[in-house]
Amino acid sequence: MRVATDVGGTFTDLVCYDVDKASGRVVGLRTAKTDTTYPQFDQGVMNAVAKAGLDPAQFDFFAHGTTVVINALLSRKGSKTALITTKGFRDVLEIARGNRPDLFNLAFKKPEPFVPRYLRREVDERSSYLGDVMTPLDPSGLDPILEDFRKEGVEAIALCFLHAYVSPENEVIARDYIRARWPEVSVIASHEISREWREYERTSTAVLTAYVHPAAKRYLETLGRSLAAAGYPHQPYIMQSNGGIDTVEGAVRNPIAMVESGPASGVLGAAALGRLLSEDKIIALDIGGTTAKCSLIENAKTRITTEYRIEWSRTNPGYPIRTPVIEIVEIGNGGGSIAGIDQGGRLYVGPESAGASPGPAAYGRGGTRPTTTDANLVTGRINPANFLGGEIEPDMENVKAAFAPLTEKLGGDMAAVARGIIRIANANMVNALKLVSLNKGYDPREFTLVAYGGGGAMHAVMLAEELQIPKVIVPTNSSVFSAWGMLMTDMRRDFVRTQVVPLAVENSARIESLFVEMADAAKASFASEAGAGKLPLRLQRFADMRYLGQEHSVKVELPDVAFDATTVAAAAERFHTTHEREYTFRLDLPVEIVNFHLVALGDVPKHEPEKLTATGKAPETAIVSERTVDFDEHGIHAASIYDRDRLEPGMAFTGPCIVEEAAATLVVTPGRRVVVDDYGNLHVHLNG
Amino acid sequence: MKTDPYTLEIIKNALVAIGDEMFLTMARTSMSPIIYEALDFSVGITDAKGELIAQGQGTTVLLAMIDSFVRDILEKFGDAGIREGDVYIGNDPYRGGGTHLSDFGIATPIFHDGTLVAFAVNKAHWLDVGGAVPGSFSTNATEIFQEGIQMPICKIIDAGTLRQDILDIIIANIRVPQESVGDMWAGVAANGVAERRVRELFDKYGHDAVLGAKDELLDYGEAMVKHELAGLPKGEFFAEDLIDDDGRSDTPLKVMVKVTITDDKFIADFSGSAPQTLGPINNSRTGLTSAVRLIFKAITNPQVPANSGSFRPIEIICPDKTVFTAERPAPVSTYWETLMYGVDLIWRALAPHVPDRLGAGHMLSVCSVVFAGTHADSGKNTILVQPLVGGWGGGTGKDGESGQFAAADGETYNVPIEITEARYGVHVDQYAFHNEDGGHGEFRGGKGVVLDYRMRTDDFTVTGSFGRFKYPAWGMAGGRDGSPNHLDIIRADGTCEVHGKVTGAKLAKGDVVRMVTATGGGWGDPKARPKAAIAEDLRNGFLTEAQAERYYGGLPG
């Protein structure tokens, strides 16, 4: 029995595959949704297990995604953290990069550092950028600092020394010295988390890691104990931001890698679906209540970046975290996004959201401004009888009142304004989709859009029309799609190191030896752990490269062969091609590698879902009603309403129509053809 | 056919998004840190007549450079002379787009169905444009001819064909052509992105709809700022100040402003300010327009996208040939020092009246430095040009911000120590807040920083322009003035030279250049500062016990 659980902001989801041990085939699928339990998240997980009627003693595999890290960061509920730096540089954390993204705001407020100045201390030590230790650390200099930290009640200590990305020796000495003398305190050395240069970003990464370390450790240990007490015989696997899972031991060592585990598992689900259906070019789109997120997947591979920041916005520089994260573009447009008119008379949608409380005007819980969900109701795209899964009846009087100020200012009736709101919301989402595709040199016409989350199916077809994407897939079980993705993933660890090396034949031995050294480290890290050592290991090589003189680099996958004189030219060509695709030009200049990036994947046994059986019923048998739906530019039509639960493989039908399921509504514009595949996924073909 | 309001809205958003996309392309592909870290560049699109439609920017001081550059092209070449496939280049400081020679403008006309519909423009600081000193800015030039190559607007690409002869002239006149030519291509690529996006919009929505949306976008900009203008206090407001000197003599220069705010006008009159100077602190009229636009935006709506419409209420009065409106052949390479006085004067005049938008005075000078020499390890020539972070003023209800770039900068990033040491071969001793006296107040000024570079070779030179060396950031409402900006050279033998401006000073191995930026001005009487805040400052080392005794009425508790 294979189980995955995903703790979200509101719900905790569970997916379970019953696997027949003899045949290795999936013989059953169970899902459950329970409320997320703050702050004892493990309780919600055990509730979901109970609700699904499962016995952990029967589990062969248990994967888990959690918001415990991002939650601790955003609510500032981490531990009291101190920082030790190289002499002369304790203020690097507070000076940060000095940037002011809100350019013209002369009353700008800089984000507060996570460690106040009196808990930032310095030691006499120094390494050079070439990796030489110039001043070895005398660890006895740490004694008075540690004494002060004890007095202050410090719970976690971050270490970040200059050039530790290339010369970690002094950090190792300090870390070991502190651990030996103060085993209860959490100690994080920057090089353990990030081996990329730029001291502010690495310091910030070490500080935020230390800040969440005690809470993450407590949480994972509690979860492990709860599962063990219920009879689970193995260790759970933990979902990471890089789109893989890791052992509890790995996650405790590097807890910051869980920071984006929720969104990552959704993208992972899209990648897994692509593998299953042999779709090699996918744009994943997740539309929730407050935001829409999208990400591009090529050949089942997600794009990874370490240029990640929390709380970053157009007005806030945020806090950088140099950990590998799936590249996701997120915008403030979801079902709850509020529409309004600003002082210049412009109609806008989002980023302000009505959330779950008060929620859209139709909830009748005090929401006085129209949201995207209300607009979808007014146009007839959402079934009033199936609103919130039929739990409540929409308050249409309240909706009318909410629209009134807008219809007054903009003219036209409520339907026209509702169409306008959806059109602007769609345009915002199209911009986000362009950021992951067109702006990176990818042509959306070659991609398939995989849409999930509560609002994905509602908007997907019209978004695809706008971008000329030929096909939309709405997966089965889309409401627990993220958890399902975890059942289909591998164990993954990313190793990234800054070493500036010109890409030249005479350096090929050096390049190869660095990759080999990193591969050895990767193998050792897997071999040392019970949950990882036995997994078959695959390695992938990437390099962040640039033209000599540039600062920013482009990530390029390298062939998995030993680096020698012949591979240099091929690697350079891959860089030129990628640079040209993303930035439209190539230069006749030397190329250099800045970061070496090795991905180690441990193959976890996976099981494909079973195909559903078809009884040969006509698609009309799934039609439950008909209603008038406003398809905007496609006109107003009487649309057939299909019940998704009654669809079966092989069925095909054509829009205008609506497909309804408990938590989602698929809107199909006129002439678009819907086909149900062998697994129950809906494929909407836009080219007839 | 009349376009519906929602489609217009979508076109407007798309036009604004083009500025952002150009900006990213430029930043990601550029060759020099002044662009990719300091983001000292600006991109934008105008309509066929040079009205600013959208702008993407990393710094605030280039607000008037995009539209005026295009108007100069139109004036020089006329509609008939501008052809599809052209790319224009130029750096004339006294005309459209003008700042100093280091900033090169690149413009690409955009055609749709054979009609000129728009221009894509970028303006970026090149690492070096030739002239007397590396990095092309000095604090002691006396004529423009000493400051680098002058490039009146010309075609670098003529109907699709690169003019290699022009490019050769540029290459022959600058010190690090590889970087600058790389940056030129980054600029051409950024314009290319805009060209594609603009054409897509015209293809999809048609000529009339896009032009209609453009007009509406400008009107929208005007409506947004007029709404804010209505909330500003009406009347006349005055301020005057002293600029340290022009770099050639010690004489301070008096500058002044009278701001008049009416229901629909914002008039800035700089009459009475000092005449243009012998030294290179002169600013041109385009720079003055940028200065007024910057502060106007700050006090009206900082977030609304910049376009010509949003600047319609502005009127600027200033005689010719002042330090704000210099003319050929006055040197201009450190123009920003004076441009920022244009901003700061209006800031000072209005700060008491818009306390939610403006606090006490800040560092003002961008504190720009140029280090040039031979890399200690690689033996290659290197030039490092960078602005520095410093302190901002306290305001109503909040202390000033510490370690932030000056208002002239914006989405500007300091150069990491680890990159400085690797790329330029100097050793960095410290990067920290300092405790020099200044900025005391009920809400104190934010802290300036000290940054020490230790030389590892015998052939580096340093140039730096640190304005507000003699006349520090102003305090208000009883708060004390801030501390001065200064650059010290501490010789290996321990002797120390303190500078506000320095050009081409020779450095030897073991010498330390100590760059110290201002702590911002304080707001309110220091004696009114809460005891808890004083205790916190003492604990964090932001205040010495002596300072607490002297300014804050003693130690708490």
Image (cartoon, rainbow, N blue to C red):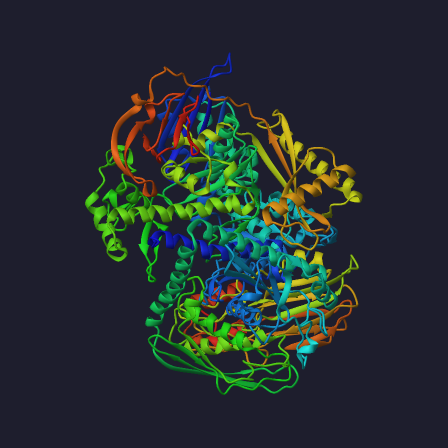
Q: Is residue B76 above or below residue A503?
A: below
Q: Is residue A91 above or below residue B481?
A: above
> Measured from the top left, where is residue A583 in percent x and y?
60, 50
Image quarter (top left, top right, bottom left or bottom right) of the C terminus of chain B: bottom left
Residue at the top extreme of this rendering: A22
Most foreground residue, B544 or A212: A212
Most foreground residue, B62 or A15: B62
> Measured from the top left, where is residue B350 in percent x and y?
41, 77
Most foreground residue, A211 or A306: A306
> Measured from the top left, where is residue A150 in percent x and y?
54, 51
Q: Can residue B439 be seen in this view?
A: yes
Q: In which quarter of the image is residue A461?
A: top left
Q: How many labels does the image show?
A: 0
Q: Is residue A98 above or below residue A82?
A: below
Q: Can residue A497 be seen in this view?
A: no
Q: In this view, does B453 lie above or below A670?
A: below
| A554 to the left or right of A28 | right
Most foreground residue, A52 or A314: A314
| A6 to the left or right of A234 | left
> Measured from the top left, where is residue A622 in percent x and y?
31, 23
